[in-house]
Amino acid sequence: MLKTTLATAAGSVFSIGSSSSARANDPLKISSQFVGAIDGAIVPRWQDPLPIFQPLAPLSEDTIPAEYEGKAVGDVLHGVAPEYHTPPNTYPTGWNLDKNGQPNPTQFYLMDAVQANITRLPASMGLQTPMWLYEGIGPNGSRTLQPQFRFHTGQPALVRFRNKLPEELSIHMHGGHWPSHSDGHASFFTHPGQARDYYYPNVLPRLPGTDKPDVSEAPSSMWFHDHAADMTSVHVNRGLRGTAPNYDDLECGLLASGVLPGLGADSDFAAKPGVAGFPNPYDIWLAIGDAVFHPTGAIWYDSNNHNGYLGNVETVNGKAYPFLEVEARKYRFRMHGASSARHRRYRLSNNSSFLRIANDAFLFPKPQVVQAFCLSPGKRADIVIDFSKFRPGTVIYLENILAQENERKPEGELDDVENPVVSGTPAFKHQLMKFIVTAPKKRNSRGLEDPNGRIYPNATITENSSLRPHDVIHDHEIAARRTLNFQRKNGQWAINGAFYDERIANVCPTLGTAEEWTLTNGSGGWWHPVHIHLESHQQVKNLSTGKAPWYHNSFKQDLTMLGSGTSITIRQRFRTFKGPFVFHCHTNEHEDLEMMFQMDPRAVGSPRPQRVQQFFP
């Protein structure tokens, strides 16, 4: 509260406050009642095109870029991950070699945190929204707000981050396998005016007992956001989030062979998807968020509300109610729950079926045919929609059919809203964006519209396509079992009755082993999306219903939703990097009010909490 008040006095991008009455005709309920807030019902629809996140090109490969101003890697206040200088021997052999057996060079990036004004509401309203944003600095001084990183498994990346804002920050790259120093730990700050070097080796952990990489851990749809302790929600709602798709040889093969939507083997993108400037026009990120807007256009946020933030205006990639022209062919959409507290169940307005191909950062073994899917804050789902089934000129809307009137939870039970089939007419429907189907376009090999180009074949993916193999965590691997109870305590949020303490490692697994955790929601009617850093996990059983997980929850994921009173058993391995790392509720306000623990994989684990073994503040 003090930091927010000081920032407000210094010209915060937020309007801070609360009041006693809300506008009765808002289509969405809001978490606090803001007098005079822009009425979500009057915000125009479908006027502005969908913003597309632009990829950031590396400044250099294998040589320190001039933009680092003569400072070597680690020549910043917080140094660099020890693994940058001495890669651990837990990497699989050849993890960083190209097809010719040569080490992949490290790609060097530069990114700032800055304040900027952007048009989040429809342009016809004439309002600018002050925000805190990431800005990537590319070759020749080019600058990109809200940049997208494109990583490739086996190719290391080093991102120098400079904090040009008035509060401490910490970047978490969500969905990857990173050293502790670079994971975006809540207490590893970059203070105002400082810089930090984030080293992303982009390595896969080993399969147990082998020197082979665990291909089922290769991530696809990662994203990054601020993770500063006690301030994550404020910072993320101010705009500090970005996207980071990753590609490995398996996924590049699916692109080159035309299974996944793209331009096939003929495209420059298929040859090297990690290079900026080679777009895939049929692979689009959709980050769905919400906000309350002050009449000036600023975001209105109640810093006193630690239950959760619900907006009354929905946004896609930061724009309120946009439209997107889509060709009559298959598209991949990387769906992302980019809200603090709102859960959504998505479907198409004509209730047609489509394919779900991933949960969080990880592709399924085979696609799942669905009519709907549910995303909590922080969760992702990759889907493929075949617009070739519709005639040009057809209009289809992306809808949310899950009502949520307060911060506690959406309507219904978790097991029901996870159902991929929509039966009957939904009682609640809120249209988020508009698809307009057009005829297929001619494009060149870089994916750009070109009258001298060609119309590329449609993707071949079906429900029977093979995607990513899944490596099961077996009973005999389990070295420890733990129960973690997510609770409400004295108006705050706790795990096993305790609050976050940066010096205490609450869970201490032994490196090279697997554990089974039972995640229990003991907080009454509240829902908690639980995100675990470092490794993905697999659900084993819903102890509350006695059912096996839904197909989409049966494989790797980095976030498990806990509904009211639910207990879900998960399994995960601990490999490559020692801690500390955090796990927490991804309702950001709950995380900020201490619903966060530390896990600290180490050479010899412990059934009891210990002091953290290393720290990189």
Image: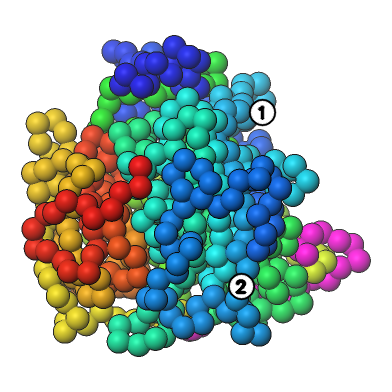
From which residue to which does the magenta span run? 446-466
Say whether residue 486 is visible.
no
Q: Which residue is mark 2?
A: 104
Query: Residue 180, percent across and down?
Result: 36, 56
Q: Nearer the viewer, residue 566 or 355?
A: 566
Identify the main secondary structure in magenta: loop
Confirm whether residue 497 shows in the render: yes
Residue in front for this viewpoint, 437 or 522: 522
Q: Quadrant of the N terminus?
A: top left
Whether residue 34 is in magenta: the answer is no
Q: Quadrant of residue 169?
A: top left
| Residue 25 figure quarter | top left
Residue 397, position as x, y percentages in the image: 54, 50
**Which residue carries the number 1 mark?**
123
At a point 52% along the width and 40% down the height, the residue shown is 195
Q: Earlier in the sequence, mark 2 or mark 1?
A: 2
Q: Which residue is rendered at x = 39% and y = 86% of the image?
A: 211
Is 211 drawn above or below residue 291 in the view shown? below
Q: Is residue 338 above or below residue 168?
A: below
- Badge 1 density bin: few <14, some 14–19, many ≥20, Cα 10 Å: some
Dot 1 amino acid type? Ala
Residue at 26 percent across and 47 percent down: it is 585
Secondary structure beneath disc 1? helix
Q: Is residue 380 left or right of residue 243?
A: left
274 or 270, which is in the foreground?
Answer: 274
Three-letter amino acid code at the position of disc 2: Asn
Nearest to viewer (mark 2 / mark 1):
2
Q: Which mark is residue 5?
A: none
